[in-house]
Image (cartoon, rainbow, N blue to C red):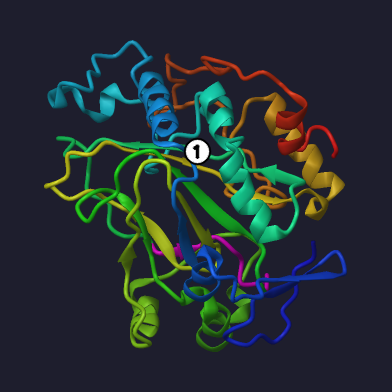
Amino acid sequence: MTANMATSTATTTSVSINNSTFRLTGPYGDWRDDLQSQGFAVVKNAIAPEKAKYYQQKALDWLTSFNTPLDLKDPSTWTVENLPFQGKSNTFNKYSVAHEKFMWEARMEPKVLDAFSKIWGTDKLLVSFDALNVTLPNMVDKPTRKPWPHVDQSPLRRGLHCIQGIINLSHAGPEDGSLIVLPRSNTITEHFFDTQTDSLTWDKNDIRWISEDEMKWFQARDMKPTKVMAEPGDLILWDSRTIHWGGEPSAQSNTIRTVIYASYSPAHWATAEALERKKEAFEAFQATTHWAHDNIVPREKEAYLPDGSLDSRNRSRPLEEPEHTEHLLRLAGVKPY
């Protein structure tokens, strides 16, 4: 897929990929209309409540499997020291967690796959090797994170390239941690880059931070941060051009936020080089980015502590490895469709 700097309009949703054009062309009469116009959508009941509860328990079992004093029934043990090392992130992507059996099971849920098939018009999909987020509310020693608004698509790319996803496994109400989005920003970020930024500063990295001053430009157009509400089993989707960040729980929350990030793209969009990088990451149990078919940047495999030493809890393989079925290997990009 080649990036170009063609002049865009504020409402474009198309992109040239491999000499073909894809676009969202609603109205559809379902959640895709929100995805197109607002930049995000919630697909209700993508996973049955009992399955969502199962996946959350597996995630919590993983979190407490590191032989630390962490006890999820005792908030006094909810300390940074007792958690697997995250660095400055609010997600877990080391310790081979991206390839745990429960992570792959969730990625292969039929209604999750069906949602992305409806977006892209194909069931021949690739999936990202994305992270797990377990956020414990009211941790004593965890610093409060300020908002970090960003888009996960380079200004050099134009049109719709990536839809990100959250497989939601916990209640996300007004006081709880959840995704924060700037509705409709997907329709105007390209115009923002073209008129408010210097193109000489653009690069190919598929992340671009939005400063506090730059946020004022969007807010002046009546675009205000919105917390996405969802229930266990819902699938949250958003256009990578939508300004977003992870919202922290308030002091009134007692919900352990538990989500799995997963993004899917048509398999035929991936180049041979991208597929080779996916295969290498898969075989090494590495996490990658939010993208499934491109921007395949393997995360650092080993878990190093702030002092530079290797974490004694480091894992080179998942605690529970998935069965490498034909379906899984095709989603991973290891085997062709």
Secondary structure at badge 1 equals loop
Q: Is residue 226 above or below residue 272?
A: below
Question: Magenta stretch: dominant SS?
Answer: loop
Q: Position of residue 28 (x, y in %)?
A: 59, 71
Q: Position of residue 270 (x, y in %)?
A: 79, 51
Instruction: Please name the residue shown 47% across and 62% down the image.
Output: 41
Within the image, what quadrant is residue 91 found in? top left
Q: Is residue 184 magenta?
A: no
Drawn side of residue 3 relative to residue 137, left or right: right
Q: Position of residue 284 (x, y in %)?
A: 67, 25
Amino acid under disc 1: Ala
Q: Position of residue 252 (x, y in %)?
A: 12, 47
Task: Identify the residue position indicated by label 1 in the image.
Answer: 131
Q: Is residue 216 above or below residue 234?
A: below
Instruction: Please name the residue shown 50% across and 24% down the image.
Output: 95
Q: Is residue 25 visible?
A: yes
Q: Is residue 331 above or below residue 14?
A: above
- Placement of the C terminus among the 4 image quadrants: top right
Instruction: Please name the residue shown 22% across and 18% down the image.
Output: 71
**Residue at the front extreme?**
29
Drawn side of residue 47 relative to residue 263, left or right: left
Label 1 neighbourhood size at 10 Å, few (<14), some (14-19), many (20+)? many
Q: Which residues are magenta?
A: 149-158
Q: Is residue 72 above or below residue 203?
A: above
Q: Is residue 291 visible?
A: no
Which residue is at the front of the view, 251 or 66? 251
**Residue at the top extreme?**
67
Instruction: Please name the residue shown 72% across and 79% down the image.
Output: 5
- Placement of the N terminus among the 4 image quadrants: bottom right
